[in-house]
Amino acid sequence: MFDDIDPRSPTPLYAQIAARVRMAVASGDLAAGDSLPSVRILARDLRVNPATVSQAYRDLAVDGFVETRHGHGTFIQEVPTFLRNEERASVAQQLVRKLLQDGARMGIEAEELSQAFKSEVGAEISE
């Protein structure tokens, strides 16, 4: 889940960590009651400061995605369907924005990307 955390990204590391957890919840990869790695273990695995992981977990708690139980760990909370759907829509929007930016850097017009997208979706549906 945390394989693509990028220290060179303009997005802060804590925000990247929190975004990965939100998406895992929205996609059903993480369910209510699942535990997250401890702050120390995740910080060690990602080679980041534990304060970075703590900030990500605090943000997730404020947004209602996790609950921290002192001495027991951090656990995924039951997330309402509308919140999961909002997160999925937000991630979809980010993916489209990145696609358009990458295409623009390569000189590919939005219409060309749209046609390629429709072609791929059509191929995916027919399989």
Image: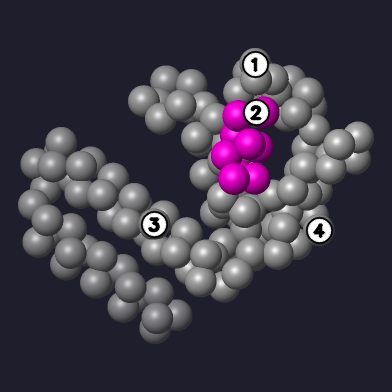
Tell me the CA gap for discs 4 and 1: 26 Å
What residue did someone put label 4 on? 33
Q: Do the residues bearing badges 2 and 4 touch, measured as CB atoms within 8 Å? A: no
Mark 3 or mark 2, which is nearer the start of the sequence?
Answer: 2
- Discs 1, 2 touching: Cβ within 8 Å: yes
Residue 49, numbered label? 1
The N terminus: image quadrant: top right
Q: Which callout, 4 or 1, points at the residue further toward the start of the chain?
A: 4
Q: Is residue 58 magenta?
A: yes
Q: Nearer the viewer, residue 124 or 32?
A: 32
Check disc 3 and give the amino acid type.
Ser
What residue appears at the point 54 percent right and 65 percent down from the top-left corner?
84
> At which x and y percent is residue 120?
31, 68
Mark 3 falls on what kind of element?
Answer: helix
Query: Which amino acid type corresponds to the residue marked 1 in the rendered image?
Result: Asn
At 42% from the left and 20% from the top, the residue drawn is 8
Report the span colored magenta: 54-62
- Marks 2 and 4, Cα distance to the nearest angstrom? 19 Å
Q: Residue 89, how many percent across, how many down?
A: 40, 63
Q: Main structural element of the magenta stretch: helix, strand or loop?
A: helix
Instruction: Name the residue beneath numbered marker 2.
Output: 53
Q: How far apart are the two marked residues, 3 and 4, measured between alpha carbons?
A: 24 Å
Query: Residue 49, how many percent across, how many down?
Result: 65, 16
Coordinates of residue 41 in the picture (x, y in percent): 79, 27
Q: CA distance from mark 2 to mark 3?
A: 22 Å
Mark sitting earlier along the chain (1/3)? 1
